[in-house]
Image (cartoon, rainbow, N blue to C red):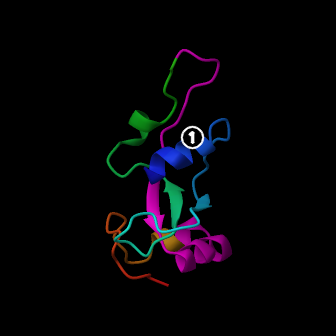
Amino acid sequence: MALAHIGEGQRGNPFQIGDTINFGERIAPDSHMTAFVIFAPAVLDREDYTGINIGETLPINLCGLYPIHEAERRYIQDHGIGAFWDLDWDPYDVSRPSVV
């Protein structure tokens, strides 16, 4: 539900790699995470998620939306997505502790 809400709210405003989204509440009842970061999809090769022709003037690019803690969101804003992505963390574990 959180992802659908974000997608609808961002309609017309393209996501950029490294963007963070403060969800403003827990992303799920069993998680302490309250934010997301945009990065490349984890399971697709670059040619499979960039420049997709959907019959419009411009092609689209798919992106991955990864759950993060508020402290991690601030870290990304201060240090950049590369510094965060290189830390030892599991992008799929919504119950993991913050890595910063």
Indicate whether residue 79 is drawn in magenta. yes
Task: Report which quarter residue 29 is drawn in.
Answer: bottom left
Residue 64 shows in the view: no
Q: How far across and down, in percent of the image, does residue 45 sit?
A: 36, 42
Q: Residue at x 59, y 66 (%)?
A: 24
Q: How far across and down, in percent of the image, does residue 57 sit?
A: 64, 18
Specify the segment rendered in magenta. 55-83
Give the amino acid type for the residue marked by disc 1 in the picture.
Glu
Q: How far across and down, in percent of the image, does residue 73 sit?
A: 58, 72
Q: Nearer the viewer, residue 30 or 56?
A: 30
Q: Secondary structure at mark 1?
A: helix
Residue 9 shows in the view: yes
- Residue corresponding to mark 1: 8
Q: Estimate how packed mark 1 is, as few (under 14), some (14 to 19) or many (20 or more) residues with alpha carbons within 10 Å.
A: few
Q: Residue at x 66, y 71 (%)?
A: 77
Q: Residue at x 56, y 62 (%)?
A: 23
Q: Residue at x 48, y 39 (%)?
A: 62
Q: How far across and down, in percent of the image, does residue 12 sit?
A: 67, 35
Furthest residue to the top?
Answer: 55
Indicate whether residue 65 is drawn in magenta. yes
Task: Report which quarter residue 60 is drawn in.
Answer: top right
Above or below, comparing residue 69 to residue 63 in the picture: below
Above or below, comparing residue 13 to residue 32 in the picture: above
